[in-house]
Amino acid sequence: MTGPFLLLHPSDTVLVARMNVAEGVEVVLDSGTVRLGRPIPMAHKIARHDIAAGATVLKYGMPIGIATEAIAAGEHVHVHNIRSAYTPTHALQDADGITAGVSL
């Protein structure tokens, strides 16, 4: 456990919020302490370390998506910066709620 965040599996690239976490909270990561730049809702994820664009994002030790941009340690990891790797027929929504250009 890392403060208000959980590490679910040793190979995970993300930590999961155990509660709503306010902007500005300091989180201790392997690479050092980071200050959250935005509030993180309960059950949402932050990057455990820097994640390169195109890298596989792991949760529960399993791939949950691909980073669509570089994600710095401590940044919110969600549909605005990862895409699903499940199936091309699954319709995703961007962070603004608009369907993300996936045809069904």
Image: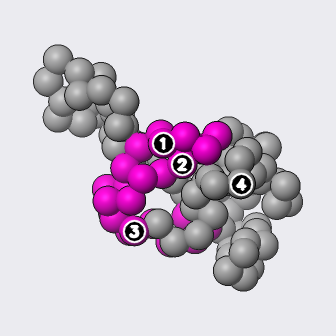
Whole-number angstrom distance, CA of label 2 to CA of label 1: 4 Å
In the picture, the disc for residue 63 is 1
Which residue is more in the foreground, 53 or 35?
53
Secondary structure beneath label 1: strand
Mark closest to the chain's N terminus, 3 or 2? 3
- The residue singled out by tag 3 in the image is 52
Among the two numbered marks 3 and 1 on one chain, the one whose residue lies closer to the N terminus: 3
Tell me which amino acid carries mark 4: Pro
Residue visible at 14% across and 24% down in the picture: 103
**Neighbour tally class for label 2: few under 14, some 14-19, many 20 plus, Cα within 10 Å:** many
> Could you tell me residue 2's position as x and y percent?
82, 60
Q: Position of residue 63 (x, y in %)?
A: 48, 42
Residue under pointer 4:
10
Start-end of magenta stretch: 52-75
Q: What element carries label 3?
A: loop
- The three-letter amino acid code for the residue at tag 1 is Pro
Q: Distance between the residues labelled 3 and 1?
A: 15 Å
Figure quadrant of the N terminus = bottom right
Q: Is residue 85 left or right of residue 102?
A: right
Q: Is the image coloured rainbow, by chain, by secondary structure, or in one colour?
A: one colour
The structure residue drawn at horizontal position 71% and vertical position 47%, both measured from the top left corner, is 9
Q: On the image, numbered disc 2 is attached to which residue?
A: 58
Q: Examine the image and state in which quarter residue 18 appears.
A: top right
Select label 4 or label 3 by which is in front.
4
Residue type beneath disc 3:
Ala
